[in-house]
Image (cartoon, rainbow, N blue to C red):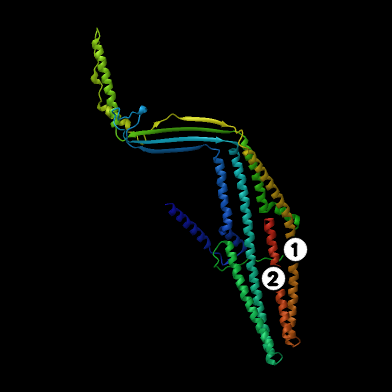
Amino acid sequence: MRIRAGALAAAALLITASARAQETVPAKMSLEQALDIARRNNPTYLQAANNMDVADWDVRQAYGQLLPSASVSTGVSWQGAGNQQLVGGLTLGQLGFGSQPSYYFSSYQVGLNYNLSMSTILGASQAKAQRRATGARMRQAEATLVQQVTQAYLEVLREQEAVRLAQQQVENSQYNLRLAQGHLDVGTATPIDVGQAQVQLGRNKVSVLQAQNALATARMRLLQQLGVSVDQHVELTTTFELTEPTWTADSLYVMAVRNNPGLAAARSTKKAADVSVSSARSAYYPSLSLSAGWSGFTQQASNTNLQMAQAQAQIANEVSQCNTLNDLYSRLADPLPLMDCTQYRLTDATRQAIIDANNQFPFKFQHSPPRASLSISLPVFQGLTRQRNLEAAKAQREDDAEQLRDQELALRANVAIDLATVKTDYQSALLEESNRSLAEQQLRLARERYQLGAITFVDLVNAQTVFAQADRDRSAAIFAYHDAVAALEALVGTSLRN
């Protein structure tokens, strides 16, 4: 049964995971849509989100510790037939009662317990502090998810641009090949120029294939970050503009102090450590314990032969005592009236009473008296355990405080560094844009001069190579700027793009 239940649970988990992996992304997807899908499906983020459910139940449990606990138990038992041993080594059989029948027993117990200590009182505060820390860590996981999805989204756009540039180079190579063939036809070029143009075209086609493979890989990595099946085609619609960064380090630091998820998690951890110190100190305080209970039991023999024999023996004893008294009464000088010894007999009513009294199992309980107790405990010495736990809690609080201070210092430095990187990348992108324009002009001029026969085909290829490199450098500078902005947004904990 346990194996079957485990298999069913595993099958349910597989079905849930499969349903999430089969979620279909829209054919055209913006960055916001990608982030929404990732929040629903990314396994790493969902693990952090699941911790919030446990933290909520930890708070409920802490409040539940302030309430009394109740327990109810019941049970049945059986004792086989036999000759019961009595005090002095005698048995019921030796006394003429025969062997003891088998017995059926049942019982119940109801208990109420209430324990109150300073640790219990502080438990709710500690659980809530831990829940706040868990919530902060979940927001930190969400911020990490946003950064990773944004980076993956940008990577797809980067590879799309790489494919466009590679295809553009193929078109330029095809144009150069036509120029070389035209010059060969009129006798102003050699077959070597045509061969070089064909080699250049072949290399650029290889670059297109490699760029297309890198794009497919980047797209699958993005879908992996979203937690969905990677065999889907999606078109990205969000564009990232190259805008001049006008932020200041001070304003960004203020935003980061307020919104940075890692710093918020460190603050929550520090507050939880404060409560942990108070909880550890509570071990020095007394505790109160209250308890109350009710119980009952039944006992029923499998037959009433022993009870009947005991009743017969008692009646025989009473008849014997009656006859003895009558004999004494008759010997007196003034005889007393004789007693009626026939009144002592086992009647049908007595037999039925014995049967009814034996009919107890399983619910005709004989209730025991209720019980209650109250105790107060004051710990005096526990082998320095309390002192050690208190010092450990204080040390952890100091560690958390230093970690918080370290994150605050690192945050200020990282904001300033990342802002400088963004500004540098912006200026670099502007320069690379200018370099591309100049390289494009040089390529256009080289083509015109080649048509006039003023330069060789090698010079034309060199001009095209310079333009291709300038185009790639421009694209790399633009995406380096967007990557730097994404990293800066992760620090300040909010979007900086309009």
Dot 1: few (<14), some (14–19), or many (≥20) neighbours within 10 Å? Answer: some
As drawn, 124 above or below 345: below
The picture quadrant where one finds residue 154 is bottom right
Indicate the amino acid at tag 2: Ser
Give residue 255's position: percent from left, percent from top. Answer: 71, 54
Indicate the amino acid at tag 1: Lys
Give yes or no for contact between labels 1 and 2 (Cβ–Cβ under 8 Å): no
Q: Secondary structure at mark 2?
A: helix
What residue appears at the point 75 percent right and 78 percent down from the top-left corner?
A: 441
Q: Secondary structure at mark 1?
A: helix
What residue appears at the point 69 percent right and 87 percent down from the top-left corner?
A: 193
Q: Looking at this rendering, what residue extends furthest in the front direction?
A: 89
As drawn, 28 above or below 111: below
The picture quadrant where one finds residue 386 is top right
Q: Which residue is mark 2?
A: 475
Residues 298 and 309: in front is 309
Screen quadrant of the C terminus: bottom right
Give residue 44's position: percent from left, percent from top. Answer: 58, 57
Q: CA distance from mark 1 to mark 2?
A: 17 Å
Q: Which residue is mark 1?
A: 423
- Residue 235 visible: no
Q: Looking at this rendering, what residue extends furthest in the top direction?
A: 333
* Disc number placed over residue 253 in the picture, else none: none
Q: Is residue 59 left or right of residue 256?
A: left
What residue appears at the point 55 percent right and 49 percent down from the top-left corner?
A: 53
As drawn, 232 above or below 124: below
Residues 85 and 42: in front is 85
Give residue 240's position: percent from left, percent from top. Answer: 67, 65
Q: Is residue 349 left or right of residue 151?
A: left
Give residue 188's position: percent from left, percent from top. Answer: 72, 91
